[in-house]
Image (spheres, rainbow, N blue to C red):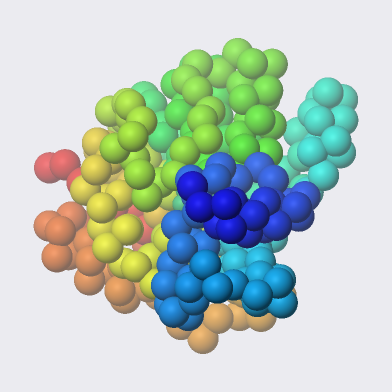
Amino acid sequence: MDERLQELLRGVKEKKELQGLPDEFILPILETYLAKQAINIRTLRPQDQKFIVKEVRAKLRREVGMFYSSSKKRTKLLTAGDKEGVLLTHASTKERFPYYVELEGYVASLHPASILDLGCGLNPLALASPNIPYYALDVNAADVEIVKSYFERQHIPGWAKVADVQHLEKISLPDVDLCLSLKLFDILGGKNPGAVEKVLETVRCKVFLVSFPTITLSGKRMRRVQRTWFEKMTERLGFSIREVLRFPNEIFYLVQKSQ
Ligand SMILES: C[S@@+](CC[C@H](N)C(=O)[O-])C[C@H]1O[C@@H](n2cnc3c(N)ncnc32)[C@H](O)[C@@H]1O
């Protein structure tokens, strides 16, 4: 790797909340940024370097880093058996916290014999149980460590892995009954709907439960809660939307893949 590129990468990862991200996840974002701005890495000035690091960090923070919480605090809560406390350390599980009983009931009503959770964050702590194999993946190693440790303590069959959903072909994925993709597809498909399409086509499952936030991170209600782009995509792929669930801050689509 070019030394200057390596230096930029190191600069980006100096921020604590981004240290759990694999280099392979950060590099394409860095390279795309350089290409878009037509920046020649060989003639980079130190002041440009600072600016690039700042811009790339901001993009990463929007995708993963803003869900960061100190891993020391989480480990302490987990060791004390305070699962609820851990769930409250992640923005997504915190927002969903008042509705987890309902969501758990809904997932149970689908009778899945196995679950795959993409971009899982800390959600597996709320939904996994010892009698159903649960496979969880996220690009953020800090979250995956917590999930792994929870699975070990609770004897949850399955695994928790660091992986990028844009490259699912690189890992061996199990065939599952239910695939969860909660609050992930806006991040993934924002600029590249093809990435979402690839996920929907690659995962082998009977149904997907896909959710999208309906409030912004600052708590404001979004103007458009329905994701028509996603509805059209599932139709184009020949999948059917079996049910739409609306929580006060999240919309869920149950998508049938196999007939
Ligand atoms: C909004 S959070 C949702 C977390 C969890 N699904 C939930 O709803 O509680 C988005 C999650 O997706 C993860 N993520 C973002 N891009 C990803 C990618 N390309 N591959 C895997 N995980 C990703 C982030 O690290 C973060 O944990």
Pinpoint residue 153: horizontal percent, then vertical percent: 69, 16
Residue 58: give x, y in percent of width and height. Answer: 65, 69
Front residue of 61/85: it is: 61
Above or below, 120 against 51 in this view is above
Q: Is residue 249 above or below residue 115?
A: below
Query: Measuring 43% from the left and 61% from the top, which residue is drawn there?
Result: 188
Residue 67 at least partly seen: no
Would residue 4 be seen by someone viewing this image from the given angle?
Answer: yes
Residue positioned 62% across, 25% down in the render = 148
Image quadrant for the C terminus? top left
Left or right relative to 25: residue 199: left
The extreme front residue here reads: 43
The quadrant holding residue 101 is top right
Question: 16 left or right of 129?
Answer: right
Q: Is residue 193 above or below residue 1?
A: below
Looking at the image, which is closer to me, 243 or 18?
A: 18
The answer to whether 184 is drawn above or below residue 118 in the figure is below
Query: Which residue is nearer to you in this view: 149 or 130?
Result: 149
Please state the horizontal and vertical placement of residue 49, each as a whole percent of the image. Answer: 66, 70
| Residue 65 left/right relative to 39 | right
